[in-house]
Amino acid sequence: MVVAAGGAPSAAAAGIAVVAVSTSLLGRAAGGLSALAGLLAARFALGWSWVDVASLGLAALAGIAGVGLVLRRLAEAADRAAALQATEARFRGLLEGAPDAIVISNAEGRIVLMNAEAERLFGYRREDLVGGPLDALMPERFRGRHAAHVRAYLERPTTRRMGDGANMFGRRRDGSEFPIETNLSLLSDHGEGLVTSVIRDLTQRREVQEREALLMRELNHRVKNTLASVQSIVAQTLRSAPTPEAFSAAVQARIAALSKSHDVLTRNDWAGATVGDIVAEQLGPYAREDAPFRLSGPEVSLRPNRAVTLGMAVGELATNAAKFGALSAGGSVSAEWSVTAGPQGLSLRFVWSERGGPPATSPAHEGFGTRLVKRSLAAGLHGSADLDYAAEGLIAVLRFPLVEGEG
């Protein structure tokens, strides 16, 4: 007997039955046994009932008109078989071309069909799973409750989504787990209760959601820190500025330095910044042909908070150089840094040197700018800042340890 996939009679089976029955009916003069054999072939090849076989057999034995009736019935059955085969082919094409994993299981929770994406997602070949339990695709901790969930679903079968926002996981052949969502729907199949599960891997979506949540927490933290920094800048500058005009200029320059540190981090998705990028961003507004600057040092990345702290210190040095130091009189600035290893781990040494400007003079009293540099290094980087007001120009040496993930 020739049967199409899934138990349906194939077009080939229908053709064989047509030939067999036609030949036997036309040769019924031999005693009718050939006709009976042909009808029995149709019974099994085309799925006819015994009532069909009996009624058509009597009709055939009644005469030529009966033979014609049998042949028409055979032709109709062959057409139906061909149509069913075409429908099955379309269904399988849709199933195999689906972008999501699809697994069809019966009321006993056993897999009857799955597509290529399900094979890829779970790492199995379908011949290893078809006929086996559906719970092989889920972690062991969920298997005990699965049968009860299947029974509850079959009692009230509705299309539903499961797993979106919940902790549902699939289990691959290698034992690894991954988050999933499943859309369930019931297939009507003569009361057999076939359940279609459309399964989607949520790994990438969860990673995006977790990153968004992390960024929101980070943003909240950054905003609070930024506002606190602005508040401190305004308060300290107000104490040291001799005139409202000086206060305005100093506050704007310091907030601009803070903003530039944030610009560097934003370009790197707040994953940190290199020392070279931090220094270049702070010196950028003062770049002129008659005021060159030179940067030299290895590529060293700092964490976001620590990058902002160094940026504020360098911004203060750059502002001071532009107002009173080398950059105010056509001189030059160099920034050099190096990493050294010690008993406590790696540390960074940063040297800011000004040349070609007016002689540096030690201020009569320590202003907010000097305190900002020193306190930033001490509080934000657990380091130190030494300022040398040499006749050739200011030399600032900043030292601080590198923490895990930096370097």
Image (cartoon, rainbow, N blue to C red):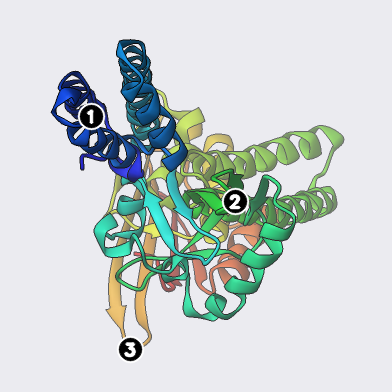
Q: Which residue is mark 1?
A: 17
- Residue 272 as seen in the image, left or right of residue 183: left
Q: Where residue 260 is drawn, which disc sits there? A: none
* Nearest to N terminus: mark 1 or mark 3: 1
Choose between 179 and 154: the one closer to the eye: 154
Q: Amino acid at mark 2?
A: Gly
Rendered-image quadrant of the C terminus: bottom left
Total marks shown come to 3
- Residue 284 as seen in the image, left or right of residue 84: right
Q: Where residue 191 is drawn, which disc sits there? A: 2
Q: Position of residue 206 (x, y in %)?
A: 55, 54
Choose between 111 and 219: the one closer to the eye: 111
Eyeballing the image, is 16 above or below 313? Answer: above
Rendered-image quadrant of the N terminus: top left
Q: Where residue 343 is drawn, which disc sits there? A: 3
User: Residue at position x 47%, y 74% from top?
Assistant: 139
Eyeballing the image, is 320 above or below 229? Answer: above
